[in-house]
Image: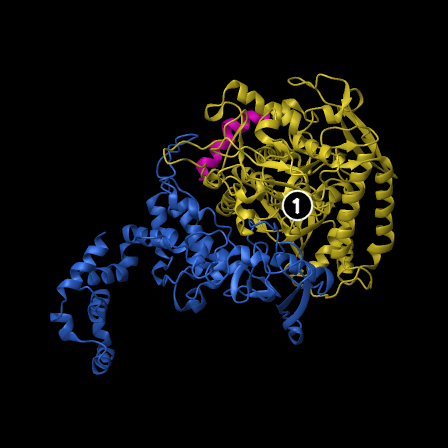
Chain colours: A blue, B yellow
Amino acid sequence: MNVQVDARSIGKAENFDGLLARNTRLNPGDPVRIRVRRFDADRPDQSGFESFVVPYDASMRVLDALNYIAEHFATDLAYRWLCGSKMCGTCAIRMNGREVLACWESVEPDMTIEPLRNLPVIRDLVVDRAPYEARVAKFEPWLERSTDYAGFPEPLSHKDMKNASKALDCISCMSCFSACPVVGLGNLTDFAGPAPLVQLAQTALDVRNDPAKVASALEHAGIFNCVSCYKCEEVCPAKIPIVTRIIEPLKAKTAELVPHAARHSMVFRAIVASRGRIDPSELVLRVQGAKVLLQVGRALRLLLRGKINPLKTLFGKNRGAADAASRILDQ
Amino acid sequence: MQIISTDVVVVGGGAAGCYAALELSRKNIESVIVCKGLVGKSGASLFAGNLVIGGGLLGNTPEQGSNTAEFLIKYHNQFLIDQNWAKRCGQWIENVYYPELEEAGLYFRRDDDGNVVTNPGKIRSVAANTQGNSGVPFMDLRRKQVMKAGIRRLEETSVTSLLRRPDGSVCGVFTVNCMTGEYAVVLGRAVILATGYSDRMHMRSTGTREMSGDGIAMAWRAGASLVNLEMQWWHTNDVAHPPTWQRIQIYPNPVLGSEHSARMVNSYGEEFFNQQIDDPMAFGPYTVQLKALVKQVRAGKARYDGGYFAGFDHVDPKEIDTYTTYGKPFYQLGRDPREGPIETAVTAHYRQGGILVDTTNMRSSVPGLYVAGGVSGHSNGLIALVTFDGKTVADGIAADIDHLLPGTLPEDQVESERRRIESMLATPGDGFAPVAVKELIRRIMWEKVGIEKNLAGLTSALEDLDQLRTLVLPNMKIKNRTRVANYEWLDVIDVHNMIDAAELIVHSSIERRESRGPFMRTDFPDTDNENWLAANIMVKTDNGFRFEQSPYELPFFQPGFVRRDNMTVPW
């Protein structure tokens, strides 16, 4: 049976890490020990971890603990928040190594609080959102209709908007942007990152949008750099299935609208379908074409080390595996 | 210091400010949005749960259309509203607002058959994507429209004062960037204040972090008249614990696609409010719920700060999960809504009153100063109404533009404001931290200017505020004098606005000698339509202020009584 498993719930019930457990492990008055990473570019000597103990109170969130610290101990602690109710998405931080919304996550008895990764730190827990904003702006994330608007309410069904609707739950907190290992590689890839892609999906997966407009945005999304590690999905406080409902549909859109941007992936898929496994030599030959001749030296080295096998590429085929693969991929 | 010149300075990046800037842009009038938080992310607009369907929209019957108007005039504003304005606004919402939003891409939630999902009842509403979360995609859309239109934004930038020409007219603003600590002056032919409701004046408030009554305080300093400041809305069922969640409401309003809605239970376990049974209009206007709660508190079965509960234990969770986010606090606490309600408390919500405006063009009483949205005093909130303000103010400025002169740099004012703000960073005090002073003000407002008020308490609040002003404010302590992301510095600036706004609110509350809807004076328990069906206008004078009254016309709806105990009035 094919059971849908929510990525973020795996292992949590078994380890007593369910939400009820997290909300009931402390009693009012119990100490909450907090280490906060401080950073002040003007005072590097004062940067580093600072420890505080805060008394637990009913249903305390991480943000309540930070507010307590700012009211009683470190009045100069810089941390950003606006709404306190999982709507503005400005209070995301890292708690014990994972991204959480401070206003939403229950405190833990021992917490290490750090700013988000993959964004410059302005001071303490406040990060510069500008790199994210620039990536979103580059997508020009607004609707452009190829046909005239039909008047309110226009013909539209939830089936048409199924994936876009999920993307519209995004509060742009950038938890996923911080958790993403590919974004962490910096400029090594042109991957836009999960948060900007969710923003893009709001209009790119909207049936009302002009396909030409969607194509030009997908052109520089770098979407095939996603390694499908599900880190983004795991940390998303809005519970958006980012890989399955955003990234995968965007990949499909790219294959449809911008085939040259999807070339590597489509070739990879075709090879698996015909061989039942990937063949690196064929992949390189078919993706790079004549350019491969410029890399004869590297090919020889790979050959000597047994990393590629031309005989296998030319003659080796496992009929059974190929049939199974094409059956799965054609589903 | 950077000097930026534009046609119009828009202060505030919520629904009203964004729409004003967009409309100005469509008229080829340039504007700059200065936002204390982030455009589309700060202020009240983000909290829009759903969008009310008025008039004849989506198959509304004439009766449903009329109910919506009645609901706005009676339950939202207790007749303290220009009914002709309400009519103009309703027509615009029906003909322009909904189509504009949808054409731009807002997703009005459909079912799988393509029907727009509404709630049953005498007044209906729809959701942008999800009920309870409609403000998020709504404001995200506005943010992107602002980007698309190429409108300049100064974000995380606090406006500290309005700048004026020698003739007193407003010609720009002085700002400080909260991230860098840099000052900038933005000059314009006109300034639109769209800073939202003066929330976060009370210990419990739905206001967002950055709110501190800045709009009211700055407008008053510039000489603008204020109106009905005492009229304050309250939420009755916002989550009691943790404090951070004081803004999360267990909505008692009708649920999209369901016949049910939340119920409220007192400390004895007795149900005392169920939307479907207890609200004749079937759209729990907050006053109806508040009055039900006041009776419980007086009977010793609830407190304003807790001891009563709200929830959905009588509803199949599927009904609230299909189209709403109403289950979110339950689930995040690891609880099933069927297990029982959660503890709730009262929270100060929108302020109906604010800056006095001419509703035909949103001019304040000071030339060059225009107003839009919650900070104006002509109606209580709905995201559609504040958007209409954005349209009206843009029309008003477009009509006036030939007479509005380009902003000129008032060097003396700029220099003295720079010194004032700089001295707040250099404050040598060793007293309270500014964040603690904010809490002191909120506590005074909660305890003495709360739901049930009287002259003795209000007078005592004035004394407390005066003591804070003379003894505590000059001696606040800033721990770190960095200019970078220094929220302590921002708090000092805020405190001075908060205390001004608080005092103005208390004076207005003393002046209105009656009870009306959510405004409850125990020393004047009657709703007095003979003397107080009128705007309570506060006018600045050379040595203080005076009050004036201006009666409201009642062309479409009338209260139908002269004087009655407010607790027996349905609205």
Q: Is residue B58 left or right of residue B210?
A: left
Residue B559 drawn above or below residue B223? above
Label 1 SS: loop
| Residue pictured at 63% horizontal, 70% vertical | A41
Q: Is residue B125 above or below residue B340?
A: above
Q: Residue at x 23, y 70 (%)?
A: A280
Q: Is residue B527 above or below residue B253?
A: above
Q: Residue at x 74, y 53 (%)?
A: B493
Residue B551 image position (x, y, % from top left): 75, 22
What is the span of residues highlighted in magenta in the rendered image? B88-106
Q: Is residue B298 visible?
A: yes
* Residue placed most toward the observer, A176 or B83: A176
Q: Residues within 10 Å of mark 1 (few under 14, many from 20)?
A: many
| Residue A289 shown left or right of residue A137 in the figure | left
Q: Is residue A101 visible?
A: no
Quarter of the image that includes the N terminus of chain B: bottom right
Q: Which residue is disc 1 drawn over? A: B207
Q: To which quarter of the image does residue B292 belong?
A: top right
Q: Nearer the viewer, residue B554 or B186?
A: B554
User: Disc 1 sits on a residue from what chain?
Assistant: B
Relative to the observer, which residue lies in front, A194 or B363?
A194
> A133 or A303, which lies in front?
A303
Query: Where in the figure is residue B116, as x and y percent of width and height?
Result: 43, 32
Residue B435: image quadrant is bottom right
Left or right of residue B217, residue B31 in this image: left
Is B98 covered by the magenta stretch?
Answer: yes
Residue B497 point in image, percent of width and height: 75, 48
Name the residue type under label 1: Gly
Where residue B300 sits: x, y (%)? 75, 37
B232 displayed left or right of B149: right
Residue B443 is a magenta residue: no
Can you say whether B463 is above or below A322 in the image?
above
